[in-house]
Image (spheres, grey):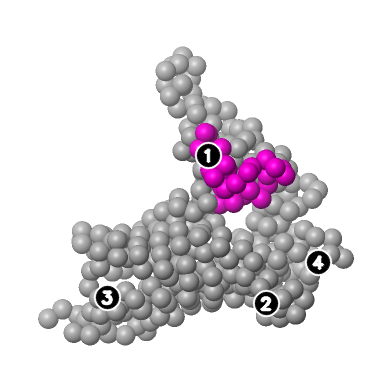
Amino acid sequence: MGERKRLSRWYFGGLGSAGAACCTHPLDLLKVHLQTQQEGKLSLLRLTVNIVKQQGVLALYNGLSASLLRQLTYSTTRFGIYEVVKQAVAPSGGDISFMVRVGIASVAGAAGGFVGTPGDMINVRMQNDIKLPPESRRNYKHALDGLIRVYQEEGARRLFAGASTATSRAVLMTVGQLSFYDQVKMTLLAHGFSDNLTTHFLSSLTAGAVATTLTQPLDVLKTRAMNAKPGEFKSIWHIITYTAKLGPLGFFKGAKLPPRLFPLPVPPRIPKLRAAIAEPLKLASETLQVGISGGTGEAAKASPISGYVPAFVRLGPHTILTFVFLEQLRKNFGFLAPE
Protein backbone atom coordinates (compact mmCIF):
# COMPACT_ATOMS: atom_id res chain seq x y z
CA MET A 1 0.00 0.00 0.00
CA GLY A 2 1.50 3.35 -1.09
CA GLU A 3 1.93 6.42 1.02
CA ARG A 4 -1.22 8.51 1.30
CA LYS A 5 -1.11 11.82 -0.52
CA ARG A 6 -1.25 15.12 1.36
CA LEU A 7 -3.69 17.71 0.05
CA SER A 8 -3.48 21.48 0.32
CA ARG A 9 -5.75 23.44 2.62
CA TRP A 10 -7.85 26.15 0.98
CA TYR A 11 -5.85 29.07 2.43
CA PHE A 12 -2.35 27.80 1.61
CA GLY A 13 -2.35 29.55 -1.77
CA GLY A 14 -3.01 32.92 -0.18
CA LEU A 15 -0.24 32.38 2.36
CA GLY A 16 2.16 31.29 -0.38
CA SER A 17 1.34 34.36 -2.49
CA ALA A 18 1.78 36.65 0.51
CA GLY A 19 5.17 35.07 1.22
CA ALA A 20 6.19 35.54 -2.41
CA ALA A 21 5.09 39.19 -2.26
CA CYS A 22 7.35 39.75 0.74
CA CYS A 23 10.30 38.50 -1.32
CA THR A 24 9.53 40.28 -4.59
CA HIS A 25 8.13 43.57 -3.22
CA PRO A 26 11.50 45.41 -3.34
CA LEU A 27 11.74 44.55 -7.06
CA ASP A 28 8.24 45.94 -7.68
CA LEU A 29 9.04 49.10 -5.74
CA LEU A 30 12.30 49.65 -7.63
CA LYS A 31 10.43 49.07 -10.91
CA VAL A 32 7.98 51.85 -10.03
CA HIS A 33 10.86 54.18 -9.07
CA LEU A 34 12.63 53.46 -12.35
CA GLN A 35 9.50 54.15 -14.35
CA THR A 36 8.69 57.40 -12.57
CA GLN A 37 12.06 59.08 -12.06
CA GLN A 38 11.79 62.56 -13.54
CA GLU A 39 15.43 63.55 -13.96
CA GLY A 40 18.36 61.43 -14.99
CA LYS A 41 18.43 57.72 -15.62
CA LEU A 42 19.79 55.99 -12.56
CA SER A 43 20.72 52.35 -12.87
CA LEU A 44 18.94 49.76 -10.76
CA LEU A 45 21.96 49.37 -8.47
CA ARG A 46 22.49 53.12 -8.04
CA LEU A 47 18.79 53.64 -7.36
CA THR A 48 18.84 50.90 -4.71
CA VAL A 49 21.88 52.42 -3.01
CA ASN A 50 20.30 55.88 -3.02
CA ILE A 51 17.06 54.64 -1.44
CA VAL A 52 18.90 52.69 1.26
CA LYS A 53 21.22 55.62 2.05
CA GLN A 54 18.47 58.23 2.18
CA GLN A 55 15.61 56.25 3.74
CA GLY A 56 17.08 53.03 5.14
CA VAL A 57 16.70 49.39 4.17
CA LEU A 58 13.07 49.24 5.28
CA ALA A 59 12.22 51.82 2.62
CA LEU A 60 12.47 48.98 0.09
CA TYR A 61 9.29 47.63 1.67
CA ASN A 62 7.24 50.83 1.50
CA GLY A 63 3.67 49.93 0.55
CA LEU A 64 4.10 46.27 1.50
CA SER A 65 0.78 46.30 3.38
CA ALA A 66 -1.07 47.04 0.13
CA SER A 67 0.69 44.17 -1.66
CA LEU A 68 -0.19 41.81 1.18
CA LEU A 69 -3.82 43.00 1.21
CA ARG A 70 -4.07 42.28 -2.50
CA GLN A 71 -2.58 38.80 -2.19
CA LEU A 72 -4.61 37.89 0.89
CA THR A 73 -7.85 38.80 -0.90
CA TYR A 74 -7.19 38.10 -4.58
CA SER A 75 -4.95 35.04 -4.29
CA THR A 76 -6.65 33.49 -1.26
CA THR A 77 -9.97 33.62 -3.08
CA ARG A 78 -8.79 32.12 -6.36
CA PHE A 79 -6.54 29.47 -4.82
CA GLY A 80 -9.19 28.65 -2.21
CA ILE A 81 -12.01 28.12 -4.72
CA TYR A 82 -9.71 26.16 -7.03
CA GLU A 83 -8.55 23.80 -4.28
CA VAL A 84 -12.00 23.28 -2.73
CA VAL A 85 -13.67 22.50 -6.06
CA LYS A 86 -10.76 20.35 -7.24
CA GLN A 87 -10.86 18.30 -4.05
CA ALA A 88 -14.65 17.96 -4.36
CA VAL A 89 -14.23 16.56 -7.88
CA ALA A 90 -11.39 14.22 -6.86
CA PRO A 91 -11.49 13.75 -3.05
CA SER A 92 -8.52 11.36 -3.00
CA GLY A 93 -6.31 13.71 -5.00
CA GLY A 94 -6.68 11.73 -8.21
CA ASP A 95 -6.16 12.99 -11.74
CA ILE A 96 -8.57 15.51 -13.25
CA SER A 97 -8.83 16.26 -16.94
CA PHE A 98 -7.10 19.39 -18.12
CA MET A 99 -10.29 21.01 -19.41
CA VAL A 100 -11.96 20.53 -16.04
CA ARG A 101 -8.97 22.23 -14.39
CA VAL A 102 -9.26 25.12 -16.84
CA GLY A 103 -12.96 25.48 -16.06
CA ILE A 104 -12.35 25.48 -12.30
CA ALA A 105 -9.48 27.97 -12.66
CA SER A 106 -11.65 30.30 -14.79
CA VAL A 107 -14.39 30.48 -12.16
CA ALA A 108 -11.85 30.86 -9.36
CA GLY A 109 -10.00 33.60 -11.25
CA ALA A 110 -13.18 35.57 -11.91
CA ALA A 111 -14.12 35.49 -8.24
CA GLY A 112 -10.60 36.35 -7.12
CA GLY A 113 -10.31 39.24 -9.56
CA PHE A 114 -13.54 40.81 -8.30
CA VAL A 115 -12.78 40.30 -4.60
CA GLY A 116 -9.23 41.56 -5.03
CA THR A 117 -10.14 44.77 -6.90
CA PRO A 118 -10.15 47.06 -3.81
CA GLY A 119 -6.76 45.78 -2.68
CA ASP A 120 -5.41 46.10 -6.21
CA MET A 121 -6.60 49.70 -6.46
CA ILE A 122 -5.02 50.66 -3.13
CA ASN A 123 -1.80 48.91 -4.16
CA VAL A 124 -1.64 50.90 -7.42
CA ARG A 125 -2.40 54.17 -5.67
CA MET A 126 0.25 53.68 -2.99
CA GLN A 127 2.85 52.81 -5.62
CA ASN A 128 1.92 55.76 -7.83
CA ASP A 129 2.03 58.22 -4.94
CA ILE A 130 5.78 58.59 -5.35
CA LYS A 131 5.46 60.27 -8.77
CA LEU A 132 2.90 62.84 -7.62
CA PRO A 133 3.91 66.24 -6.22
CA PRO A 134 3.84 66.30 -2.39
CA GLU A 135 0.67 68.39 -2.25
CA SER A 136 -1.21 65.94 -4.49
CA ARG A 137 -0.23 62.70 -2.75
CA ARG A 138 -2.86 60.69 -0.96
CA ASN A 139 -0.41 59.56 1.74
CA TYR A 140 -2.27 56.48 2.89
CA LYS A 141 -0.72 55.28 6.15
CA HIS A 142 -1.29 51.66 5.22
CA ALA A 143 -3.63 49.53 3.12
CA LEU A 144 -6.54 49.52 5.60
CA ASP A 145 -6.28 53.29 5.94
CA GLY A 146 -6.51 53.50 2.16
CA LEU A 147 -9.65 51.34 2.07
CA ILE A 148 -11.34 53.39 4.79
CA ARG A 149 -10.47 56.72 3.16
CA VAL A 150 -11.66 55.64 -0.29
CA TYR A 151 -14.93 54.46 1.24
CA GLN A 152 -15.40 57.70 3.19
CA GLU A 153 -14.21 60.14 0.51
CA GLU A 154 -15.29 58.46 -2.75
CA GLY A 155 -17.95 55.92 -1.82
CA ALA A 156 -18.13 52.13 -1.77
CA ARG A 157 -18.58 51.77 -5.54
CA ARG A 158 -15.22 53.42 -6.14
CA LEU A 159 -13.51 50.50 -4.40
CA PHE A 160 -14.56 48.29 -7.32
CA ALA A 161 -13.66 50.66 -10.15
CA GLY A 162 -12.00 48.65 -12.92
CA ALA A 163 -13.40 45.35 -11.65
CA SER A 164 -14.30 44.13 -15.16
CA THR A 165 -10.75 44.48 -16.46
CA ALA A 166 -9.27 43.02 -13.28
CA THR A 167 -11.66 40.06 -13.48
CA SER A 168 -10.83 39.31 -17.13
CA ARG A 169 -7.12 39.42 -16.45
CA ALA A 170 -7.51 37.31 -13.30
CA VAL A 171 -9.28 34.58 -15.29
CA LEU A 172 -6.39 34.32 -17.75
CA MET A 173 -3.81 34.58 -14.96
CA THR A 174 -5.42 31.81 -12.91
CA VAL A 175 -5.81 29.51 -15.90
CA GLY A 176 -2.17 30.06 -16.81
CA GLN A 177 -0.83 29.61 -13.30
CA LEU A 178 -3.00 27.01 -11.55
CA SER A 179 -4.29 24.71 -14.25
CA PHE A 180 -1.01 24.63 -16.18
CA TYR A 181 1.02 24.17 -12.99
CA ASP A 182 -1.02 21.10 -12.08
CA GLN A 183 -0.86 19.76 -15.64
CA VAL A 184 2.91 20.17 -15.99
CA LYS A 185 3.53 18.74 -12.52
CA MET A 186 1.33 15.73 -13.28
CA THR A 187 3.21 15.16 -16.55
CA LEU A 188 6.61 15.34 -14.84
CA LEU A 189 5.54 12.95 -12.09
CA ALA A 190 4.29 10.51 -14.73
CA HIS A 191 7.71 10.56 -16.41
CA GLY A 192 9.76 9.60 -13.37
CA PHE A 193 10.20 12.91 -11.55
CA SER A 194 9.75 12.97 -7.78
CA ASP A 195 7.47 15.32 -5.87
CA ASN A 196 10.35 17.59 -4.86
CA LEU A 197 11.67 21.11 -5.27
CA THR A 198 12.97 20.47 -8.80
CA THR A 199 9.54 19.40 -10.02
CA HIS A 200 7.88 22.34 -8.27
CA PHE A 201 10.38 24.77 -9.80
CA LEU A 202 10.02 23.45 -13.36
CA SER A 203 6.22 23.37 -13.11
CA SER A 204 5.96 26.90 -11.71
CA LEU A 205 8.47 28.25 -14.24
CA THR A 206 6.32 26.88 -17.06
CA ALA A 207 3.14 28.18 -15.42
CA GLY A 208 4.67 31.65 -15.10
CA ALA A 209 5.59 31.69 -18.79
CA VAL A 210 2.11 30.54 -19.82
CA ALA A 211 0.41 33.09 -17.54
CA THR A 212 2.57 35.89 -18.99
CA THR A 213 1.71 34.77 -22.53
CA LEU A 214 -2.03 34.67 -21.80
CA THR A 215 -2.23 38.01 -20.00
CA GLN A 216 0.18 40.05 -22.13
CA PRO A 217 -2.26 40.64 -25.04
CA LEU A 218 -4.88 41.95 -22.60
CA ASP A 219 -2.26 44.20 -21.00
CA VAL A 220 -1.30 45.52 -24.44
CA LEU A 221 -4.90 46.33 -25.34
CA LYS A 222 -5.54 47.94 -21.97
CA THR A 223 -2.38 50.05 -22.21
CA ARG A 224 -3.17 51.15 -25.78
CA ALA A 225 -6.62 52.27 -24.62
CA MET A 226 -5.18 54.18 -21.67
CA ASN A 227 -2.50 55.90 -23.77
CA ALA A 228 -4.68 56.66 -26.82
CA LYS A 229 -5.46 60.24 -27.79
CA PRO A 230 -9.13 61.33 -27.56
CA GLY A 231 -11.02 59.85 -30.49
CA GLU A 232 -8.11 57.72 -31.69
CA PHE A 233 -10.01 54.47 -31.15
CA LYS A 234 -13.77 54.09 -31.44
CA SER A 235 -14.08 50.88 -29.40
CA ILE A 236 -12.13 47.98 -27.93
CA TRP A 237 -12.70 46.07 -31.17
CA HIS A 238 -11.04 48.95 -33.05
CA ILE A 239 -7.98 48.57 -30.80
CA ILE A 240 -7.92 44.80 -31.40
CA THR A 241 -8.08 45.15 -35.19
CA TYR A 242 -5.48 47.92 -35.19
CA THR A 243 -3.09 45.79 -33.11
CA ALA A 244 -3.75 42.72 -35.25
CA LYS A 245 -2.46 44.59 -38.32
CA LEU A 246 1.00 44.46 -36.73
CA GLY A 247 0.90 40.67 -36.80
CA PRO A 248 0.70 38.15 -33.91
CA LEU A 249 3.68 39.75 -32.14
CA GLY A 250 1.80 43.03 -32.08
CA PHE A 251 -0.08 41.73 -29.04
CA PHE A 252 3.21 41.18 -27.21
CA LYS A 253 5.06 44.46 -27.82
CA GLY A 254 4.57 48.20 -28.13
CA ALA A 255 3.59 50.00 -31.30
CA LYS A 256 6.98 51.65 -31.64
CA LEU A 257 10.09 50.37 -29.96
CA PRO A 258 13.23 52.36 -29.06
CA PRO A 259 16.56 52.05 -30.89
CA ARG A 260 18.24 48.72 -30.37
CA LEU A 261 20.66 48.32 -27.53
CA PHE A 262 23.25 46.13 -29.24
CA PRO A 263 24.57 45.92 -32.82
CA LEU A 264 23.54 42.84 -34.74
CA PRO A 265 26.41 40.33 -34.43
CA VAL A 266 25.89 38.78 -37.86
CA PRO A 267 28.75 38.76 -40.42
CA PRO A 268 27.74 40.74 -43.53
CA ARG A 269 29.24 38.00 -45.72
CA ILE A 270 26.27 35.75 -44.94
CA PRO A 271 23.32 37.79 -46.25
CA LYS A 272 20.75 34.98 -46.09
CA LEU A 273 21.60 34.16 -42.48
CA ARG A 274 21.59 37.84 -41.61
CA ALA A 275 18.20 38.37 -43.20
CA ALA A 276 16.78 35.33 -41.44
CA ILE A 277 17.77 36.30 -37.92
CA ALA A 278 17.99 40.07 -38.13
CA GLU A 279 14.44 40.77 -37.02
CA PRO A 280 14.44 38.30 -34.06
CA LEU A 281 17.73 39.79 -32.84
CA LYS A 282 16.43 43.30 -33.28
CA LEU A 283 13.24 42.52 -31.37
CA ALA A 284 15.17 40.84 -28.54
CA SER A 285 17.59 43.76 -28.35
CA GLU A 286 14.79 46.33 -28.31
CA THR A 287 12.84 44.40 -25.67
CA LEU A 288 15.91 44.23 -23.46
CA GLN A 289 16.43 47.96 -23.97
CA VAL A 290 12.95 48.74 -22.65
CA GLY A 291 13.30 46.28 -19.77
CA ILE A 292 16.71 47.60 -18.71
CA SER A 293 15.64 51.22 -18.99
CA GLY A 294 12.62 50.48 -16.79
CA GLY A 295 10.32 52.16 -19.26
CA THR A 296 11.69 55.64 -18.69
CA GLY A 297 12.67 58.45 -21.01
CA GLU A 298 12.40 57.77 -24.73
CA ALA A 299 11.67 54.13 -24.10
CA ALA A 300 8.54 54.99 -22.19
CA LYS A 301 7.38 57.42 -24.86
CA ALA A 302 8.10 55.02 -27.69
CA SER A 303 6.56 51.91 -26.18
CA PRO A 304 3.58 51.95 -23.79
CA ILE A 305 4.44 48.49 -22.48
CA SER A 306 7.65 46.96 -21.27
CA GLY A 307 7.50 43.91 -23.53
CA TYR A 308 7.14 40.21 -22.97
CA VAL A 309 10.56 39.51 -21.43
CA PRO A 310 10.35 42.19 -18.70
CA ALA A 311 6.76 41.12 -18.02
CA PHE A 312 7.91 37.56 -17.42
CA VAL A 313 10.84 38.76 -15.31
CA ARG A 314 8.31 40.42 -13.01
CA LEU A 315 5.72 37.64 -12.93
CA GLY A 316 8.04 34.61 -13.09
CA PRO A 317 9.77 34.93 -9.69
CA HIS A 318 6.48 35.60 -7.92
CA THR A 319 4.85 32.56 -9.53
CA ILE A 320 7.80 30.31 -8.69
CA LEU A 321 7.98 31.44 -5.06
CA THR A 322 4.20 31.18 -4.64
CA PHE A 323 4.12 27.52 -5.68
CA VAL A 324 7.32 26.61 -3.84
CA PHE A 325 5.85 28.03 -0.61
CA LEU A 326 2.48 26.40 -1.35
CA GLU A 327 4.04 22.98 -1.88
CA GLN A 328 6.07 23.22 1.31
CA LEU A 329 2.93 24.14 3.25
CA ARG A 330 1.08 21.21 1.65
CA LYS A 331 3.81 18.66 2.35
CA ASN A 332 4.33 19.76 5.95
CA PHE A 333 0.90 20.98 7.08
CA GLY A 334 -1.58 19.56 4.56
CA PHE A 335 -4.17 16.92 5.43
CA LEU A 336 -4.08 13.30 4.32
CA ALA A 337 -6.32 12.41 1.38
CA PRO A 338 -9.15 9.98 2.21
CA GLU A 339 -8.51 6.40 1.22
Magenta stretch bounds: 219-246
Residue at 38% from the left image edge and 73% from the top image edge: 82
Inspect the image, locate mark 2, and give the three-letter code of the amino acid beneath it: Ala
Give whichever of discs 3 and 4 has the lower sequence position. 3
**SS assignment at label 3:** helix
> What label does residue 10 carry, if any?
none
Give whichever of discs 2 and 3 has the lower sequence position. 3
**SS assignment at label 1:** helix
Inspect the image, locate mark 4, and give the three-letter code of the amino acid beneath it: Arg
Choose mark 4 or mark 1, whichever is in front. Answer: 1
Q: Residue 241 appears at what percent x and percent y? A: 53, 39
Question: Front-most of 184 and 324?
Answer: 184
Q: Is residue 16 left or right of residue 182?
A: right
Measured Cα–Cα span from mark 3 to mark 4: 48 Å
Give whichever of discs 2 and 1 has the lower sequence position. 2
Residue at 79% from the left image edge and 50% from the top image edge: 38
Inspect the image, locate mark 3, and give the three-letter code of the amino acid beneath it: Val
Choose mark 2 or mark 3, whichever is in front. Answer: 2
Q: Is residue 130 placed above or below 75 in the rendered structure?
A: above
In the picture of the structure, the residue carrying the numbered disc 2 is 156
In the picture of the structure, the residue carrying the numbered disc 4 is 137
Measured Cα–Cα span from mark 2 to mark 1: 36 Å
Measured Cα–Cα span from mark 2 to mark 3: 36 Å
In the picture of the structure, the residue carrying the numbered disc 1 is 241
Residue 230: in magenta span = yes
In the picture of the structure, the residue carrying the numbered disc 3 is 89
